[in-house]
Image (cartoon, coloured by chain):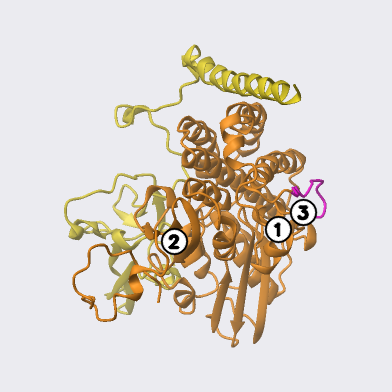
Chain colours: A orange, B yellow
Amino acid sequence: MYRETKILNVDSKVSPIGGDLEGAVGADEGELVINVGPQHPATHGVLHLVITLQGETIQKVEPHLGYIHRSIEKMCESLSYRQFIYVTSRMDYLSAHINNHGCALCVEKGLQLEIPPRAQVIRVLMDELTRIASHELWWGAMAMDLGAFTPFFYAFRERETINDIMEETCGARLTMNYMVPGGVMYDIHPNFQKRVKDFIQLFNNKIDEYDDLVTNNIIFQNRTKGVGILSAADAISYGCTGPVARGSGVTCDIRKLYPYEVYDKVAFDEIIETAGDSYARYLVRIKELRQSVRIIEQLIDNIPDGDFQAKTKAVLKLPRGEFYSRIETARGEFGVYIVSEGGTTPYRIKFRSPGFSNLSALDHMSRGSKIGDLMAIMGTLDLVIPDIDR
Amino acid sequence: MAFLKQYISEIYQAVSSLLKGMKTTGSYFVRPKEIITQQYPDNRADMKIPERFRGEVVMTHDENNEHACTGCTACELACPNATIKIVTKFDTTPEGKKKKALDTFVYHLELCTMCNLCVEACPTSAIKMAQTFEHSVYDRSQLLKKLNKPGSKLRAGVE
């Protein structure tokens, strides 16, 4: 059991819930246990952190999960292979498209479906737009964690443009449900290419603006450089993926290592920073924005003609067996594992969410730092709590 | 001496980086045209909602109060949340045969996640997504909707 709070001026030696209070007071003098969350604006959701402090220095961080558990994996067992995709939008709601894409890939793997080239390019375009939107929101929230409020509005201004593009083509702003097994739900909107090009033109200047505002800001740099250091070996042993591991110098971009769709045909760089501190993780995401723009620029004029959806049966049945597919979301590796008994619904589904593994490194990274740095470290992890809890 | 030099250069960098940030913020102050805030709900009249936007499921009726729903329950089976319930009845055709037809199309808006799977599943395009989005009501029972209008019947020729 963890120590909940330090109890001061206790007369009785027996706690109301039973058990000895002697142990709860804490072995070390001056040690303080405080709760951050589950209702705390800086934890971006219902995350509960139990922090053990010695003065202002963090000794231990224990994340307590389960406040937004919706048993999505169990729910998926009663849904058909077409239906379960929409639920995964509710896990990592900031990269809903990419989650749906990962599930669609896994079902297609089971069905051995050939995806039309047009659908593949549309999917990659949508993924990269989602990645920009997700990093955009992270950038605003990260600056807000450090006390800067204006970047939040700047980030939302550009994110709004992407949301409008999504709304026009996919029909929804956040939980699009645009990916279906075999392709995408409908063809792109006639305005899509023009609007994306307008956005890219506008966005290139905006990243420079972000650098002026936050990246090169001396207060920001002093608060993030050398804070929350995660070595490459630790990043691997904690199972960190995505920008968190790449900030520590680990090559882990699924788009490069196990290319899906058309990622092996486009030119882009995997961003690696070796410092392993908060600033390195920040730089990885900012540089990824430019790489996403680069991918979109290569594909937006080269959408091949043809079908946007492969012909599929009305009722999808996966053959008996186990299927796993992985995809790079804005936060790291997202895995879908389906066990099929040959029926219309999966026997078991397991999602490997990037946020869960990245959160597990928080304790290691923040030990020895000051309590004020904890939010800076958490901000660079880019946590989405529904993704961790599922 | 080296320490002093570094100290002064750090201060210079700090001040210049802060001024650079302030310049970005200040430049928006003199460019009010770039403000993108919308004054909702004052701009409700000229708001543009894309035609693909998924607000709620509606059933299309033509001018003769006829719809295209045959009561095949494809949408009910496609729905992941049991949002749709189709109640069928038996109509007698002029030849005297009994034929299954739609009685009530029950739609629970409070359960709907706007995933569009029912519209995709419909073989006769009887239902579609509407662009309405202001769904707040005072009582949950008001969200339970009957999509087929009273007195409506199946359009001739739709099987």
| Label 3 environment density (alpha carbons within 10 Å; few <14, some 14–19, many ≥20) | some
- Residue A32 falls in which quadrant of the image? bottom left
Horizontal and vertical percent for residue B1? 75, 21
| Label 1 environment density (alpha carbons within 10 Å; few <14, some 14–19, many ≥20) | some
Q: What residue sits right under mark 1 in the picture?
A: A231
Q: Is residue B158 left or right of residue A113?
A: left
Horizontal and vertical percent for residue B153? 29, 61
Q: Is residue A244 left or right of residue A44?
A: right
Mark 1 element type: loop
**Three-letter code for the amino acid on which mark 2 is drawn:** Thr
Residue A86 seen anywhere in this rendered image of the structure: no
Q: Residue at x 51, y 41 (%)?
A: A163
Q: What residue sits right under mark 2 in the picture?
A: A52
Q: Compare marks 1 and 2 and give the one earlier in the sequence.
A: 2
**Three-letter code for the amino acid on which mark 3 is drawn:** Tyr
Q: Which residue is drawn at 39% across and 70% down?
A: B76
Horizontal and vertical percent for residue A344? 54, 81
